[in-house]
Image: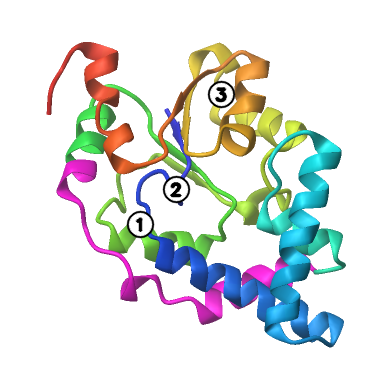
Amino acid sequence: MVFDLDGTLYVNNDLGREIHLCACRYIAELKGTTVAEAGELVRETKKKLSAANGIDSTLSHACMEMGGDLKEIHRRFADEIMPEQFLSIDERVVTLLQSLGSKYELLIYTNNNRPLSTRIMEAIGVAGLFRHILTIEDYWQPKPDRETLEKIYLAIGRKPAECLFIGDRYDIDLRLPAALGSTVFLAKSVEELLPLNKLLHGEDL
């Protein structure tokens, strides 16, 4: 079972805004504009990429399109974002993952970086529940990326049909795995995530 992290195992708009603002500060420095102007550039670039590609665009792709360096963006995320200020443990999610982990191998596959992902997982109480944690730092290609996904199947020793992907953004987290033969589960909130165990096994938590 391959879980996305942000927006899937927790939802926190304030943390999302902090990450967006951090990226905008970087783009403002890069372009010599104000942070507000950089925010508009990011929005317009995401809109343009989404229209061109026919799928939702990510913050990472937008920043890269504007000449940003992905490694520098994530260095800043790791240094400047304090997830502990925004997050807390939801015991329902912890219980769900513990139950699923007794039956399946659990993995994280996230566009976030490893230091920030680690702190987020600690803050929401799910650290240590995943066999593999795959972050942007493993391949430096944001989701969705077919070559990276194929490498992940090889790395974990599983065929696509043996994997279930769980995420909150269909275009980013699920469309490509589904196209390659994996089962997918869309969960845009914790409330939509919680029935997963029952749907798989008829079990209630």
Residue at which label 1 appears? 121
C-alpha separation, residue under disc 3 versus residue under disc 2: 21 Å
Tell me, yes or no, whether the two marked residues, 3 and 2, touch with CB atoms within 8 Å.
Answer: no
Residue 195: where, in percent of width, then height?
Answer: 25, 26
Q: Residue at x 35, y 51 (%)?
A: 10
Q: Badge 1 local density, few (<14 within 10 Å), some, or many (20+)?
A: many
**First-in-chain label (3 vs 2):** 2
The label on residue 157 is: 3
Which residue occupies the extreme left position in the image?
205
Residue position for label 2 = 5
| Residue in the foreground of this view, choosing between 190 and 113 | 190
| 100 is higher (above) or lower (below) than 73 | above
**Image quadrant occupied by the N terminus:** top left
Is 196 a magenta residue? Answer: no
Q: Position of residue 52 (x, y in %)?
A: 86, 40
Category of crowding for the residue at label 2, using alpha-carbon neighbours closer than 10 angstroms: few (below 14), some (14–19), many (at least 20): many
Residue 148 percent location from the top left of the image: 71, 37
Mark whose residue sits in front, 3 or 2: 2
Question: Which of the two residues, 167 or 120, is positioned nearer the viewer here?
Answer: 167
Q: Secondary structure at mark 1?
A: helix
Residue 202 located left or right of residue 179: left
Q: Which residues are magenta?
A: 69-94
Q: Is residue 13 left or right of residue 111?
A: left
| Element class at badge 3 | loop
**Amino acid residing under circle 1:** Met
Q: Looking at the image, is mark 1 or mark 2 earlier in the sequence?
A: 2
Q: Main SS of the magenta segment?
A: helix
Could you tell whether 156 is left or right of 203 in the image?
A: right
**Disc 2 marks which amino acid?**
Leu
